[in-house]
Image (tube, rainbow, N blue to C red):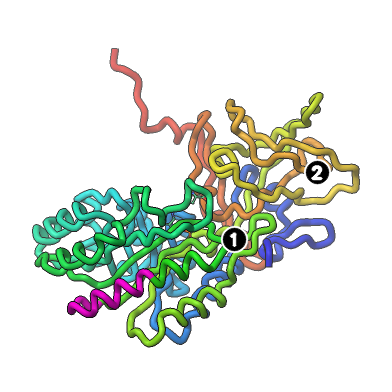
């Protein structure tokens, strides 16, 4: 169900058994709040669809790299999809199993490759011919053999926002479908690479099943073609990308996705790997913010809140919609507001044209903020990043302290003279 982690009980918005007004009072605003139950349920539901088949769910760390969230998923048996040495370090610090890590990304450095080889990750998702050669050389220098998949670009239209669509020909991700067969032969011939899988990821926030299935069909055709020349892959990584409901989208549910993928797979004996990010965390998190000022205008009313584009960049960057609801309902007439932050940019908005009954000091919850919220935050305008808390039943745990201003310039120095 939509935003099921956050329920209104007697006019008070709750995360599980905790009133969000209480969280705001105790930890201040802006503050990200996550529900342990919602995170757990999303992971388990995703995995359940594939329960009869060998599979590995690798949470896409970029969606939310909180150590507490990574640790929770690790305890549930998750693997992780990483895109940097930094994310690898986080996974290890959070108790993640390196043997369940896949490493994606077009720009892996030699140092990142070494770190991943030393940790003993599950697979490198290689995105270019040049990367294959570099990985072979780095593995050779360490006396190791690197497990690899090629990320193939199946050239299907994910029908999502152009900034987050990655499966079409004209983008930087993956290798062209037409080149994959010969690149696999090259990979198989390199002594310090072992071909383990085929990988594909076509985009994010997909709300239809058909692009996933079209891409999977093309990947399966490649897998069959490779098997025919003696390159038998052990796994297929189908990437991430399942969308969530922000307002009225109807993304495929996990069981429909799983059933359709398994049906296409047929009797092929390969492990399935997935890299969901948003679908596991998006609706398990909200950003709490306080109304600082109401500023009525001739054509627009502004509600100026204490969260901004540096805390949640998605509205400014993608014109993304996030529902905004008061944590405590007020029996008063609504007005239509532009909900904006204090940052000095006209693009600093969190929501347009929202009908709300507001008073200064009210706390609002910006919903569906668990994915690509905190992970894309910045310190623009020297704004310390928000605190993060996890609700578990009637318990609240601070999982990241609010930054202090001193921390923001602790690494800086002035000129000597
Ligand atoms: N695997 C790879 C190789 C990816 O590039 C991504 C996301 C994922 C998995 C996870 O995709 P998901 O399941 O979360 O859709 N900042 C944007 C989203 C960027 C997604 C980038 N890649 C946003 O806020 O909408």
Residue 66 visible? The answer is no
Within the image, what quadrant is residue 345 found in? top right
Foreground residue among 108 and 201: 201
Q: Specify whether residue 220 is painted magenta.
A: yes
Secondary element under disc 2, as helix, strand or loop, is strand
Residue matched to label 1: 244
Q: Which badge, 2 or 1, comes first in the chain's sequence?
A: 1
Instruction: Decide: is 202 above or below 340.
Output: below
**Disc 2 residue lies near ligand 1 with CB under 8 A:** no
Across and down, in percent, residue 364 comes to 72, 46
Tell me where the magenta segment starts and ends, as one range.
218-232
Across and down, in percent, residue 278 comes to 52, 59
Say which residue appears at 32% left-offset and 62% top-offset.
152
Instruction: Decide: is 301 above or below 123.
Output: above
Foreground residue among 404 and 90: 90
Say which residue appears at 31% left-offset and 67% top-offset.
98
Residue matched to label 2: 356
Q: Specify whether residue 164 is painted magenta.
A: no
Foreground residue among 404 and 42: 42
Single out the mark in the foreground, 2 or 1. Answer: 1
Across and down, in percent, residue 19 comes to 73, 57
Across and down, in percent, residue 148 comes to 24, 66
The overriding secondary structure of the stretch rendered in magenta is helix
Foreground residue among 218 and 346: 218
């Amino acid at each position: 169900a939509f935003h099921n982690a956050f329920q209104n009980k007697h006019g008070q918005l709750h995360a599980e058994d905790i009133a969000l007004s209480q969280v705001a009072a105790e930890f201040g605003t802006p503050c990200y709040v996550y529900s342990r139950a919602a995170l757990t349920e999303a992971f388990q539901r995703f995995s359940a669809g594939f329960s009869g088949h060998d599979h590995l769910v690798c949470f896409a760390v970029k969606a939310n790299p909180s150590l507490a969230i990574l640790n929770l998923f690790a305890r549930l048996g998750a693997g992780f999809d990483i895109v940097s040495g930094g994310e690898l370090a986080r996974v290890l610090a959070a108790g993640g199993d390196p043997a369940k890590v896949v490493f994606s990304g077009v720009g892996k450095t030699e140092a990142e490759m070494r770190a991943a080889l030393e940790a003993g990750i599950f697979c490198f998702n290689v995105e270019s011919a040049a990367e294959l050669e570099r990985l072979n050389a780095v593995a050779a220098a360490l006396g190791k053999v690197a497990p690899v998949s090629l990320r193939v670009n199946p050239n299907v239209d994910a029908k999502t926002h152009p900034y987050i669509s990655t499966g079409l020909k004209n983008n930087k991700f993956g290798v062209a479908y037409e080149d994959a067969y010969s690149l696999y032969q090259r990979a198989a011939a390199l002594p310090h690479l072992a071909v383990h899988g085929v990988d594909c990821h076509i985009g994010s926030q997909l709300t239809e099943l058909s692009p996933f299935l079209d891409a999977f069909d093309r990947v399966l055709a490649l897998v069959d073609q490779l098997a025919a020349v003696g390159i038998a892959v052990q796994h297929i990584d189908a990437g991430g990308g399942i969308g969530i409901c922000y307002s009225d989208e109807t993304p495929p549910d996990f069981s429909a996705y799983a059933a359709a993928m398994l049906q296409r797979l047929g009797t092929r004996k390969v492990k399935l790997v997935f890299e969901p990010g948003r679908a596991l965390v998006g609706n398990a998190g909200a950003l709490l913010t306080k109304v600082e000022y109401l500023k009525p205008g001739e054509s627009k009313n502004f509600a100026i809140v204490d969260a901004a584009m540096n805390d949640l960049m998605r509205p400014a960057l993608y014109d993304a919609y996030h529902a905004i609801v008061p944590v405590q309902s007020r029996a008063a007439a609504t007005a239509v507001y532009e909900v904006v932050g204090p940052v000095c940019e006209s693009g600093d908005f969190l929501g347009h044209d929202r009908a709300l009954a507001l008073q200064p000091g009210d706390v609002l919850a910006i919903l569906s903020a668990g994915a690509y919220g905190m992970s894309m935050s910045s310190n623009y305008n020297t704004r310390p990043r928000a605190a993060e808390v996890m609700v578990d039943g009637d318990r609240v745990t601070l999982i990241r302290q609010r930054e202090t201003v001193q921390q923001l310039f602790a690494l800086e120095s002035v000129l000597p003279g």
